[in-house]
Amino acid sequence: MTFPNIEPTDVDPEGASAPLSAPACVLAIGANDPSGAAGLAADVLTIASVGAHPLPVVTGAWIRDTAGIRDFFGLPEEAVAEQARAALEDVSVRVIKIGFAGRPETLAVLAELTTEYGEIPVVACLPDLTWWSDDAIDAYLDALRELLLPEVTVLVGNVGNLTRWLLPEWSGERGPTPRELAIAAAEFGTHYVVVTGIHQGHETIENVLVNAQSVLASERFERIEAVFSGASDTLASALAALLATGCDLTEAFRDALQYLDGALDAGFRPGMGGAVPDRLFWAQPDEAENAEEAPEGSIDLLNQPFNDTRH
């Protein structure tokens, strides 16, 4: 697949080029991440990269760097709802992508909003909550399960996080299968689940699209030995954007994984913590194209080494 998914153009009688149709619009709801690793930064770059137009709605701001999350400051739920409603009443939104809402009260107003606009598919990403207190995690996940899951079309999450959330009493010697996780999600009204991070040996990771009846698609990729921030947000945003551009669910799942694999393979470390997916990997010039000799004595200030620039 080639990124971005750019529409063909027409030429008007005066010679000006114009798109045949405007990009599909995706409403992305989530937290601001000042490190650029996850949250709305991941959403905006990813959605634009695969050819859709992002409509970002801020739920609050993480205090974090590339090493981890320290705190979160949430906006009042009314402010989040009014942002989303302003976009929905003005723009034809194809898909809604929901990341970290920040507060159970915000999840409640988002559930009302997605119910009101029930014809729009919802892709929800189960966020990393390990930085939070146990009480806050329990309150957030209870609200997510009871209020928002009935409105979610596709739930995206790591197999470990999904197991702890959907099947907290699981006690079998083996872990639950993706279908067992989908059955648990279906009890709350979610139709499809993307289960990521299933280890197949030491070198391969499997990712599965599944519903309560069967496995719909499965893709395996070589494991990359790096700790990434923002991989789940990247996958969920790519899936939402590809659905918005007209892909069916299975095709969108496969292409979103291909996009994520490319972004992870080109990942880099902008700071002293974890690696960040390069969501514009497709736009980077080949190294061979940059092999021309610079003029003698020149200094390239934009190409100086900084930490580890590749994973």
Image (cartoon, rainbow, N blue to C red):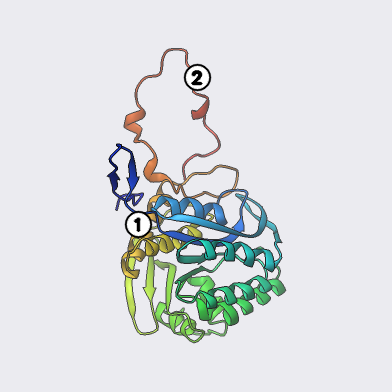
What's the residue at 43%, 12% (across, down)? 296
- In percent of width and height, residue 265 lies at 40, 49
- In percent of width and height, residue 168 lies at 57, 81
Question: Is 196 above or below relative to 259?
Answer: below
- Front residue of 68/212: it is 212
- In percent of width and height, residue 36 lies at 57, 49
Amino acid beneath label 2? Ile
User: Residue 280's image quarter?
Assistant: top left
- Front residue of 107/138: it is 107
Looking at the rendered structure, the secondary structure element under dot 2 is loop
Q: Which residue is mark 2?
A: 299
- In percent of width and height, residue 175 lies at 46, 78
First along the sequence among labels 1 and 2: 1
Dot 1, how many residues are within 10 Å of its Cα: few (below 14), some (14-19), or many (20+)?
Answer: some
Q: Which residue is mark 1?
A: 258
Q: Residue furthest top?
A: 296
- Front residue of 105/119: it is 119
* Residue 241 as seen in the image, left or right of residue 83: left
In the rendered structure, find residue 237 and report the number of the disc placed on it: none
Question: Is 25 above or below relative to 265?
Answer: below
Looking at the rendered structure, the secondary structure element under dot 1 is helix
Is residue 38 among what the camera can see?
no
* Residue 140 as seen in the image, left or right of residue 3: right
